[in-house]
Image (cartoon, rainbow, N blue to C red):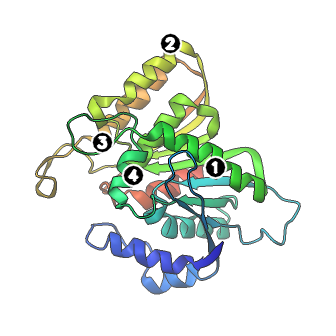
């Protein structure tokens, strides 16, 4: 186990998105000041089933060592290789300002030695795409790894409150969260799903929802959806075509869930006006965290 500065990870995150239109929530000096207050632990946790090597990043609450009697909610962040540095700092800032409870924050890495897009494309999607030339459809296997390896490791070593698991995912990460929700909803109690890629594979996620609805009438979960207000269908030269209408996609999916009348299901949603697929990440995350852990 090694200890690495969250600020060093933040540099990677900032470099990854330097060409995007994402707003600067913190200046570099402000971010460094905030992030330097804590250390993130990096732990290698290989998947024994696939043999792939992964890491997790762990940020403990500021008062963790001072409050041995206290158990904390667990917040799991998909796309941790990019999102964890900034979002763990945002979670800490909200807690310091007493807007949310302190939580143990865990970021999920991509498979080591693989391009991040190859790793997330495989691990976060529910079905294969024959003829695409790319590997998709590993969400079930990754979900098994998350349950049997990651959650087991974290909850065996840290004081996690029972029934207080929160999952955050954006884009493909949001799709992964929806897959977990519809196949093993009790794995988390709260799901924060940002700009979920419900369009993937001709909306394959709806087949999962249909299967769930045929078997179950109860869905005990608090689901928080958000999407950027600019994420509508439009021509995007960078994508060499039209973008998917993520706003309509979110609205359609939550309408489907509401129409089922599932017992125990609590749904909230938010359109982050003036933001796109990237710039919606942090305000959407903070909105979701306030809704999940607000004081």
Q: Is residue 202 above or below residue 230?
A: above
Q: Is residue 18 above or below residue 150?
A: below
Q: Nearer the viewer, mark 1 or mark 3?
A: 1
Tell me the residue at 27%/67% (across/down).
20
Label 3 element class? helix
Screen quadrant of the N terminus: bottom right
Callout 4: 10 Å neighbours few (<14), some, many (20+)? many
Q: Would you say the residues marked 4 and 2 are in contact, meaning their CB atoms lie under 8 Å apart?
A: no
Label 2 or label 1, whichever comes before in sequence order: 1
In the rendered image, residue 43, in percent from the top left (x then y), is placed at 62, 66
Q: Nearer the viewer, mark 4 or mark 1?
A: 1
Q: Nearer the viewer, mark 4 or mark 2?
A: 4
Label 4 or label 2, whichever comes before in sequence order: 4
Viewer-nearest residue: 266 or 107: 107
- Which residue has dot 3 on it? 246
In the rendered image, residue 39, in percent from the top left (x then y), is placed at 63, 77
Label 1 or label 3, whichever comes before in sequence order: 1
For residue 149, which numbered disc appears in the image? 1
């Amino acid at each position: 186990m090694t200890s690495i500065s969250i600020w060093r990870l933040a540099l990677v995150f900032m470099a990854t998105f330097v060409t995007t239109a994402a707003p600067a929530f913190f200046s570099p000096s402000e971010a460094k000041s905030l992030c330097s207050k804590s250390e993130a632990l990096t732990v290698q946790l290989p998947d024994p089933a696939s043999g792939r090597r992964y890491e997790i990043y762990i940020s403990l609450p500021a008062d963790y060592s001072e409050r041995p009697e206290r158990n904390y909610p667990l917040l799991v962040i998909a796309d941790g290789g990019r999102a964890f540095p900034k979002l763990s700092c945002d979670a800490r800032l909200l807690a310091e300002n007493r807007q949310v409870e302190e939580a143990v924050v865990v970021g999920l890495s991509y498979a080591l030695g693989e391009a991040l897009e190859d790793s997330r494309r495989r691990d976060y999607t529910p079905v294969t795409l024959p003829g695409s030339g790319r590997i998709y459809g590993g969400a079930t296997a990754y979900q098994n790894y998350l349950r049997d390896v990651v959650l087991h490791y974290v909850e065996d070593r840290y004081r996690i409150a029972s029934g207080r698991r929160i999952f955050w995912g954006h884009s493909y990460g949001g799709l992964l969260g929806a897959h977990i929700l519809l196949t093993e909803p009790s794995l988390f109690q709260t799901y924060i799903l940002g700009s979920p890629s419900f369009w993937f594979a001709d909306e394959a996620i709806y087949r999962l929802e249909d299967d769930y609805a045929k078997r179950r009438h109860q869905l005990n979960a608090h689901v928080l959806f958000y999407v950027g207000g600019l994420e509508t269908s439009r021509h995007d030269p960078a994508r060499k075509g039209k973008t998917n209408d993520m706003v309509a996609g979110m609205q359609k999916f939550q309408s489907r869930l509401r129409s089922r009348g599932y017992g125990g299901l609590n749904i909230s949603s938010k359109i982050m006006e003036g933001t796109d697929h990237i710039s919606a990440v942090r305000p959407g995350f903070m909105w979701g965290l306030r809704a999940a852990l607000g004081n």
